[in-house]
Amino acid sequence: MTLETTMTPSVQSPPAAAAAPALNAVVLQRVEIAPGLLILRVTTRGAALPTFKPGQYTVLALPGSAARAPLSEPEDPAAAPDKMIKRAYSVASSSLEGEYVEFYVTLVRSGALTPRLFALAPGASLYLSPKYTGMFTLDQVPEGANLVFVATGTGLAPYMSMLRTRLATMHDRRVAVIHGARNSWDLGYRAELLTMQRLCSWFTYIPVISEPAQEPVTWSGQAGLIQDLWRSGVLEQAWGAPPTPADTHVFLCGNPLMVDNMLELLGAGGFRQHSNKQPGEVHLEHYW
């Protein structure tokens, strides 16, 4: 319903500018794991951290006046100093973690927000939205169904939240992560995922890099593209049986080309894309 009022032009006031959100959060820790890859832990000032479901995302923001990291490129045009620059990021921390919220961020050198996030030091202020949203969760996965989490780059973030929250209770199913990156040093959370694999017999971690020739030490793991790795049957070899729509749900997050290629391969194998109207076994997060 729309309410209309009549006002004399001479006394009409201009609309008030929306107040910028307060910088309600602080950087607790930052770990730059490789050039252009950052793990950022953020906590609120005084208020309790809101609850969320593993796989959901929230919004971070900084004003245009915030400094940019040295490796970034100049903005064109430059952001207005009082403009709040907001972007959505998937949460990487467990939903059971009550001290901080963790984000896995890649530097977009010409971007508006990530160069400013990379310039933040512990103790720096930023905005953290109290609202978390997104349907890229485990809610639509039947109990006991096998899980395959496929990601490139920072598309791994929502899976880290799911694994950190629920992996220990998933011993009634198989769980696998296939994570693709350009080089081995870009495989964020690799040490943690390897530890999960050692501790949980039902968990399989398959890292794959696309440029093994650049490695300073010979790479002995998987190389190439994720879709080619899937065609090779790498997961069937690890599990001893192929994943099928009858027993497995697949999550895809990352490079759109990888997602499109995997959708085609999975569709040929009988997997259906999930939607609210048509339940299926393939779940997508549009990360770009």
Image: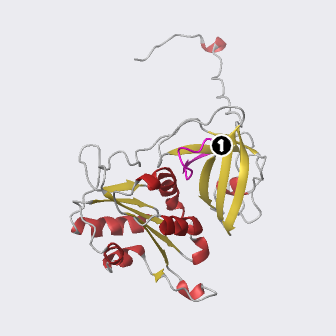
Q: How is the image coloured?
A: secondary structure
- Depth check: give the residue in front, 22 or 148: 148
Q: Amino acid at mark 1?
A: Glu
Residue displayed at 61% across by 37% down: 49
Left or right of 146 in this view: 99: right
Q: Quadrant of residue 23?
A: top right
Q: In the rendered structure, which segment of residues is drawn in magenta?
A: 84-99
Q: Which residue is mark 1?
A: 99
- Residue 162 visible in the displayed image: yes
User: Could you tell me residue 265's position as x and y percent?
Assistant: 28, 70
User: Could you tell me residue 263's position as x and y percent?
Assistant: 31, 64
Q: Quadrant of the N terminus?
A: top left
- The verdict on residue 92 being magenta is yes
Q: Is residue 251 above or below residue 20?
A: below
- Residue 112 visible in the displayed image: no
- The verdict on residue 153 being magenta is no
Q: Secondary structure at mark 1?
A: loop
User: Could you tell me residue 197's position as x and y percent?
Assistant: 48, 68
- Depth check: give the residue in front, 78 or 255: 255
Left or right of 80 in this view: 86: left
